[in-house]
Amino acid sequence: MDKKKSALTEKDGVSQPETTSKSSAEKIKFSRRKKTTTQEYITQILAGNIPFLSKAITLVESTNTKHQKQATEIIEACLPHANKSIRIGITGVPGVGKSTFIEALGKHLTSLGKKVAVLAVDPSSSVNKGSILGDKTRMEELVTDKNAFIRPSPSGTSLGGVAQKTRESIILCEAAGFDTIIIETVGVGQSETAVHSMTDFFLLLKLAGAGDELQGIKRGIIEMADAIVINKADSGNEKNAKIAKVEFNRALHLYPPKDSGWQPKVLLASALHQKGVDDIFLMIQNYINTVKNNGYFQQKRNEQNNYWLLETINQQLKSNFYNNPKIKELLKNEVLNLKKGKTTPFTAAQRLLNINYGTE
């Protein structure tokens, strides 16, 4: 006797079309499974492979411990092939035309047969930690140049908006064969100081007719500049630009002579119309020749290495402190005690530091 059929039966549904071919699916599966070895990174970077260079910089920027370990191995292997470029720092307030200027300079350099890497640090939001990373959209022509590489990086919470790993990225770019490295700052905070400590030539972009000339009589950023370029000297603004040039020249002569033996110059430019860019590069070349001949070039790089040694120690100590599980828990308690008025910021900090170093 036949068994009764259940009312709960399943009918064949409509078959779904394959969205990915089997060969593509296998490639995706393989690429996800395969891990790039350190030696593969090194070999490909030294061969000038841009995708591998980008991936290596991503490793450098990662906070993952395993990534950091691999990145360190890659950097150490690339170091003997680095330090052969000219490093140019470019800064200026937002709206001064940094991206347009860098693109014009970059195109001029590639037309001369040079390989240019642009490490552009974009401002990160202090609220949601997001970053626009728009330099690749602003430098439309340079980004398609086969002899140029543009790498925007979020500034995060590092000093003055300069990405903490920019200096390591410079080494990787040099090992990949780029002979000119341009570093663009966000133009706010203390970013200029950090960029000055990792470049050979420091260029400050200014605007004419925007009240910016008054900055020329102040110390600080002007004092660090090896040259001042007054941008947007076009569209009827030429007169204001020439007046600004005179003002800045007067201001620069008030400062004591630089250790480099170089007298900072003031030039006019219109990056939008690519005017004055060739003169600016000739000036940079003259500067490099001057400081290489008098020994200041290597002296400055040695000083920069010392600076970044101490800076890296400071960063690592800070990271170790805040990542200590015991400190994390105790820090919460100290914050609560502060709210209740049971301690002071200084006493709480000293107590945490003593615990961290085992002196309490």
Image: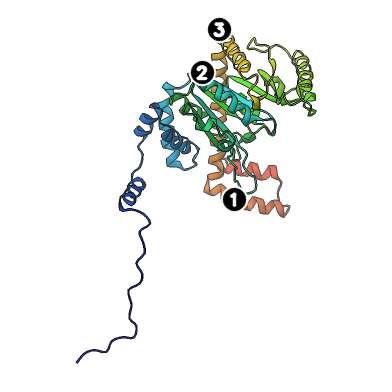
Confirm whether residue 132 shows in the render. Answer: yes
Question: How far apart in space, not on screen, are marks 3 and 1 (Cα)?
Answer: 56 Å
What kind of residue is marked 2?
Leu
Confirm whether residue 360 shows in the render. Answer: no
Quadrant location of the N terminus?
Answer: bottom left
Question: How far apart in space, not on screen, are marks 3 and 2 (Cα)?
Answer: 23 Å
In-front residue for pair 202/352: 202
Residue that label 1 marks: 330
Indicate which disc residue 230 carries: none
Q: Which comes sooner in the sequence, label 3 or label 2?
A: 2
What kind of residue is marked 3?
Asn
Circle 2 sits in a helix, a strand or a loop, which is it? Answer: loop
Q: Residue shown at 71%/46% (left/top)?
A: 344
In-front residue for pair 53/295: 53
Between tags 2 and 1, which lies in front?
Answer: 2
Residue that label 2 marks: 112
Question: How far apart in space, not on screen, are marks 2 and 1 (Cα)?
Answer: 59 Å
Q: Which comes sooner in the sequence, label 3 or label 1?
A: 3
Q: Which comes sooner in the sequence, label 2 or label 1?
A: 2
Q: Residue furthest top?
A: 293
Query: In the rendering, at what x and y percent does residue 355 appear?
Result: 57, 44
In the image, is 328 to the left or to the right of 214?
A: left
In the image, is 147 to the left or to the right of 36?
A: right
Query: Are the residues flagged by discs 3 and 1 in contact, CB closer than 8 Å?
Result: no
In the image, is 137 to the left or to the right of 146?
A: right
Residue that label 3 marks: 293
- Within 10 Å of disc 3 (Cα), the crowding (few <14, some 14-19, many 20+) is few
User: Would you place residue 258 above or below residue 100 in this image?
Assistant: above
